[in-house]
Amino acid sequence: QQQVKQSPQSLIVQKGGISIINCAYENTAFDYFPWYQQFPGKGPALLIAIRPDVSEKKEGRFTISFNKSAKQFSLHIMDSQPGDSATYFCAASGYSGAGSYQLTFGKGTKLSVIP
Amino acid sequence: GAGVSQSPSNKVTEKGKDVELRCDPISGHTALYWYRQSLGQGLEFLIYFQGNSAPDKSGLPSDRFSAERTGGSVSTLTIQRTQQEDSAVYLCASSPQGPNIMNEQFFGPGTRLTVL
């Protein structure tokens, strides 16, 4: 069964600190790894994504690090702000075998950034 | 432009009743997905529609669940004989084309279903 394991389940970081969320996958056929951000009462929204041909992608304060050999990827939020408080989901995309590509999501990390 | 909309935003029903959840995707998006989000369980894929192709129903948890998409636009997810374990947030997403793994999925706000 395709799985994406995400940790930690919750994270508390002080303002200005670095938030790190980790994910691991099993299916080597996965070849697209997005991170989604979800605020309470809202649907998830794409934050940043990476393909396995690169080891790192940075957009502003958000960086994805990717380790293909270890089948792990992580999200780093630099200079974390209270407005970053949300639930973060990692995901992986692969062919479902039924004519479509699906996103398999991790269980989410609830990030709280305290002033 | 409007995003993905879903209705109702909240639905409370009694065990055994049928419910219908509606999704209006972004205009022009040919791919439409339904997900279920249970507390602490992440996002569970349910069903995928792409244009006029047969839907991918591989994620539907039981035959009590069904979905249709009329005219390649609006979609309805129907749950028959609801059970308490069906309580969750049901999310709809659309993307501009598919299947293409690089296409961003745009999510609606979800319908929170509570089965008493």
Image: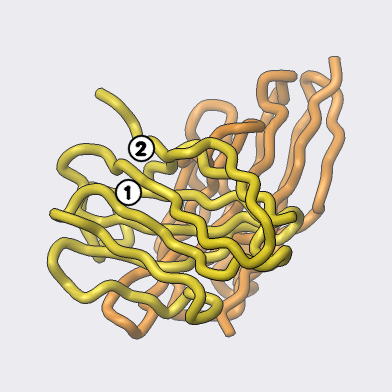
Q: Position of residue B55 (x, y in %)?
A: 28, 72
Asked where in the image residue A80 lies, by quadrant, the reply is top right
Asked where in the image residue B52 lies, by quadrant, the reply is bottom left
Q: Is residue A69 above or below residue A105?
A: below
What's the chain of the residue with tag 2?
Answer: B
The residue that appears at 68% across and 29% down in the rendered structure is A78
Whether residue B26 is visible to the viewer of this picture, yes or no, is: yes
* Residue carrying label 2: B4
Q: Is residue B105 left or right of residue B38?
A: left
Whether residue A52 is visible to the viewer of this picture, yes or no, is: no
Q: Are marks 1 and 2 in contact (CB under 8 Å)?
A: yes
Q: Is residue A21 left or right of residue B79?
A: right
The residue that appears at 31% across and 55% down in the rendered structure is B32
Q: Position of residue B103 (x, y in %)?
A: 30, 52
Which chain gets the yellow colouring? B
Is B25 in front, or is A69?
B25
| CA separation in Å, label 1 and label 2 | 7 Å
The local crowd at label 1, few if under 14, some if 14 to 19, many if 20 or more residues have their Cα within 10 Å, is many
Which amino acid type is shown beneath numbered disc 2? Val
The residue that appears at 49% across and 49% down in the rendered structure is B91
The local crowd at label 2, few if under 14, some if 14 to 19, many if 20 or more residues have their Cα within 10 Å, is many
* Residue carrying label 1: B94
Q: Secondary structure at mark 1?
A: strand
Asked where in the image residue A32 lies, by quadrant, the reply is bottom left
What's the chain of the residue with tag 1?
Answer: B
The residue that appears at 56% across and 58% down in the rendered structure is B36
Which amino acid type is shown beneath numbered disc 1? Ser
Residue furthest to the top in view is A115
Is B91 in front, or is B22?
B22
Q: Secondary structure at mark 2?
A: loop
Which chain gets the orange colouring? A
Is B11 in front, or is A17?
B11
